[in-house]
């Protein structure tokens, strides 16, 4: 299976994130990508598809914010990374958002996704890796891997969050549709619900979103991912949420997976995109499932047996020492 990556994705390295009332070392490190690279045969350099496929998913004002916020923050005299600290509470009047402080809140889902001067470049090339994997599939490959880092599934049309800035899976899905595919399915198997992906395609009938994740009653992102969220309008029934309790292991996970795969099969996609997070791993430091390294090949086989052209886009996974083998195990199983 071909895989894609660009070294510029390593440059994003925020210092700290907000966690349990204090600032701790940022969990979504460049070392994650290095560990995955080291465990795989050589990845290919991503091709540059420009900003058009990014702007087909993301709001232009938001993209401008990602590009310019670090310089504006520095001009305002701030020493640290850009981090929102004030938010427009639901229902407040739209305000003039000239201040970088106001913009940072407006475009943020949380305060654990800082921006540095190198973030835009890294996020841009992470999206380009996904688009390059899509190219491989368009030219006949059955499956392709995108080492997306920073990850994408928490980022919405106009907001960052959960270590995500550009929604790589959504950008690839939209590019598939814009390239002539009629239906694309996104299967999200990261530990966390992919609120951004769900949000982007919420009212769309041409992109199916299925997610298996920790119950948002106990886990981030809390406001999304409940079983009764099924989409609206033309998208009603094109969102499927399968929350699992903390502690869930491979048996429960595979049962939910079978349900998700059956729903996707009924949808009959031209392309499947797997948002693959290895933070379901038993020793993940911020998560609570009990998937073992050897289980990833089984999960991958279940998906591969469906026979869809499949793009695998990397999402989370924070047990850095095990990350290479978990990703390699998944890809080998596929
Ligand atoms: C892409 C991705 O996996 N993003 C994850 C973002 C999660 N951020 C908040 C995590 C809060 C974790 N609290 C964990 C308590 C563990 N004892
Ligand atoms: Zn995650």
Image (cartoon, rainbow, N blue to C red):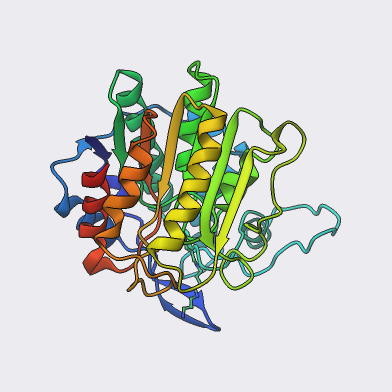
Residue 288, image x, y percentages: 44, 73
Residue in the foreground of this view, choosing between 290 and 259: 259
Residue 18, image x, y percentages: 51, 75
In the displayed structure, 173 sits above or below 246; it is above
Residue shown at the point (20%, 58%) measured from the top left: 325
Q: State which quadrant residue 34 falls in.
A: bottom left
Residue sticking out furthest to the top:
180
Residue in the foreground of this view, choosing between 80 and 165: 165
**Quadrant of the frame with the C terminus:** top left
Residue shown at the point (56%, 67%) measured from the top left: 220
- With 296 as the anchor, is 51 left or right in this view? right
Residue 3, image x, y percentages: 24, 38
In the displayed structure, 269 sits above or below 145; it is above
Residue in the foreground of this view, choosing between 69 and 274: 274
Viewer can see residue 5: yes
Q: State which quadrant residue 55 falls in.
A: top right
Number of numbered discs: 0
**Quadrant of the frame with the N terminus:** top left
- With 332 as the anchor, is 188 left or right in this view? right
Viewer can see residue 166: no
Quadrant containing ligand 2: bottom left
- With 146 as the anchor, is 101 left or right in this view? right
In the displayed structure, 245 sits above or below 177; it is below
Residue 246, image x, y percentages: 50, 73
Residue shown at the point (68%, 39%) measured from the top left: 237
Residue sticking out furthest to the bottom:
21
């Amino acid at each position: 299976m071909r895989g894609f990556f660009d070294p510029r994705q390593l440059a994003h390295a925020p210092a700290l994130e907000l966690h349990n009332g204090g600032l701790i070392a940022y969990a979504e490190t460049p070392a994650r990508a290095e560990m995955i690279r080291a465990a795989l045969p050589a990845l290919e350099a991503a091709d540059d598809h420009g900003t058009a496929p990014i702007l087909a998913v993301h709001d232009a004002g938001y993209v401008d914010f990602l590009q310019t916020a670090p310089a504006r923050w520095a001009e305002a005299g701030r020493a640290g990374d850009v981090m929102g600290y004030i938010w427009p509470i639901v229902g407040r009047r739209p305000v003039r958002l000239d201040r970088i402080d106001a913009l940072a809140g407006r475009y943020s889902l949380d305060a654990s996704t800082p921006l540095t001067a190198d973030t835009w470049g890294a996020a841009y090339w992470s999206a380009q890796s996904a688009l390059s994997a899509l190219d491989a599939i368009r030219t006949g490959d059955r499956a392709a891997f995108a080492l997306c880092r920073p990850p994408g599934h928490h980022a919405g049309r106009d907001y960052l969050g959960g270590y995500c800035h550009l929604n790589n899976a959504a950008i690839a899905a939209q590019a598939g549709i814009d390239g002539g595919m009629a239906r694309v399915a996104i299967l999200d198997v990261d530990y966390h619900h992919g609120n951004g992906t769900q949000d982007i395609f919420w009212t769309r009938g041409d992109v199916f979103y299925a997610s298996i994740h920790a119950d948002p009653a106990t886990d981030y992102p809390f406001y999304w991912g409940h079983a009764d969220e099924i989409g609206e309008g033309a998208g009603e029934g094109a969102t499927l949420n399968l929350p699992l309790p903390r502690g869930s292991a491979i048996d429960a996970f595979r049962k939910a997976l079978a349900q998700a795969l059956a729903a996707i099969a009924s949808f009959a996609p031209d392309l499947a995109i797997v948002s693959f997070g290895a933070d379901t791993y038993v020793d993940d430091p911020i998560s609570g499932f009990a998937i073992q390294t050897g289980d990833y090949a089984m999960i991958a086989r279940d998906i591969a047996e469906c026979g869809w052209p499949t793009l695998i886009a990397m999402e989370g996974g924070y047990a850095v020492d095990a990350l290479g083998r978990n990703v390699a195990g998944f890809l080998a199983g596929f």
